[in-house]
């Protein structure tokens, strides 16, 4: 008996794509009554927080029970926002435009096509071409709103002040001190004795440490014209401390300890020696009773 061979039936070829059984997991159903349509790109209502299809996405389309609530909340938030400023200027136009501060430039700035750049040094506004300091010669311009100076540097001011000081010192030296006489020592002793009677100072200074000086202030130093006083100081003091005490006695404004510029600082000029005294020098080393010192302002450091 002949054996028969059995073969498995041929597999049927599939001509369609298998659909995902979880199709409902993609998208959402419209929550509007009587619709329930599955929408793969649903819309969310910000007022009632519901999800709707394209046809019922608007508040009027799905008859939103909280219609207008989201828009009102947004307006309230914008009104309370600190960044909201109704006074901000609008977009630049030809009515608000200005010309570049460079004299040779005719470009209008602060327009829609050309913005303006402010220079913090000269306080002027320029176009993009002349915005750099080198392009508009900023170093030769006087800053807008700044007080115009005399044009002299601090070194030149100090040099001119010292020249004026030397001439003034010679004149004062002849006017303040008595001319030498045959009995110069006796005359000086009499002058010092008279000075001791009229001099004022700190009563706590011991008598043996006192040094008696004529103190004056130049007209440019104070509002009074050449005020003067007879004072005594401690010979152990520094010149800086003498300056503070003398300024207080003559009621001269003293800003040395405020960190101002040299043009506002006071200096002590010694008439007999013809020079400015250093703040750190000892009074007893550079002065003797009967000498004259002058308070000067803006003459620069001691040379």
Image: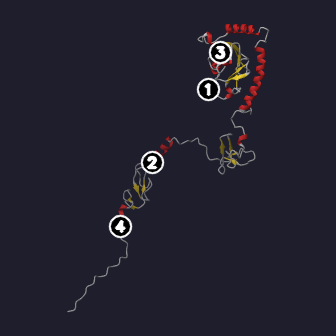
Badge nearest the viewer, 4 or 3: 3
Mark closest to the chain's N terminus, 3 or 1: 3
Which residue is label 3 attached to? Answer: 249
Which residue is label 4 attached to? Answer: 20
Q: Element under label 3?
A: helix
Which residue is label 1 attached to? Answer: 258
Q: Residue 230 in the image: x percent, y percent?
A: 68, 12
Q: CA distance from mark 2 to mark 3?
A: 77 Å
Q: CA distance from mark 4 to mark 3?
A: 103 Å
Screen quadrant of the N terminus: bottom left
In the rendered view, tell whether residue 39 sits above or below residue 279.
below
Q: CA distance from mark 4 to mark 1?
A: 85 Å
Which residue is label 2 attached to? Answer: 70
Q: Element under label 4?
A: loop
Badge nearest the viewer, 1 or 2: 1
Badge nearest the viewer, 2 or 3: 3
Q: Element under label 2?
A: helix
Q: Residue at x 68, y 19 (%)?
A: 286
Answer few, some or many: residues within 10 Å of disc 3's Cα (few below 14, many 20 plus, some between 14 and 19): some
User: Which residue is more in the foreground, 137 or 38?
Assistant: 137
Mark closest to the chain's N terminus, 2 or 3: 2
User: Which residue is more in the foreground, 125 or 59?
Assistant: 125
Mark closest to the chain's N terminus, 4 or 1: 4
Residue furthest to the left: 1
């Amino acid at each position: 008996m002949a054996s028969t061979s059995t073969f498995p039936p041929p597999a049927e070829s599939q001509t369609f794509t298998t659909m995902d059984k979880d199709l409902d997991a993609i998208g959402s159903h419209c929550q509007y009554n009587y619709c329930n349509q599955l929408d793969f790109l649903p819309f969310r209502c910000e007022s009632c927080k519901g999800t709707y299809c394209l046809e019922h996405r608007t508040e009027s389309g799905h008859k939103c029970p909280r219609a207008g609530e989201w828009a009102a909340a947004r307006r309230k938030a914008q009104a309370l926002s600190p960044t909201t400023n109704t006074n901000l200027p609008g977009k630049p136009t030809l009515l608000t435009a200005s010309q570049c501060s460079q004299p040779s430039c005719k470009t209008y700035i602060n327009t829609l096509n050309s913005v303006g750049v402010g220079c913090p040094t000269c306080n002027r506004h320029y176009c993009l071409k002349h915005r750099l300091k080198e392009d508009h010669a900023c170093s030769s311009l006087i800053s807008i709103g700044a007080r115009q100076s005399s044009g002299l540097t601090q070194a030149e001011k100090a040099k001119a002040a010292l020249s004026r000081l030397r001439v003034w010192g010679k004149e004062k030296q002849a006017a303040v001190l008595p001319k030498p006489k045959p009995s110069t020592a006796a005359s000086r002793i009499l002058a010092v004795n008279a000075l001791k009677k009229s001099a004022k100072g700190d009563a706590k200074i011991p008598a043996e440490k006192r040094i008696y000086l004529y103190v004056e202030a130049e007209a440019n130093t104070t509002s009074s014209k050449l005020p003067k006083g007879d004072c005594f100081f401690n010979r152990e003091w520094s010149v800086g401390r003498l300056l503070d005490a003398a300024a207080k006695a003559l009621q001269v404004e003293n800003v040395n300890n405020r960190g101002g510029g040299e043009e506002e600082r006071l200096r002590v000029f010694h008439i007999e020696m013809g020079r400015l005294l250093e703040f750190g020098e000892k009074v007893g080393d550079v002065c003797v009773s009967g000498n004259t010192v002058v308070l000067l302002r803006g003459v620069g450091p001691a040379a």
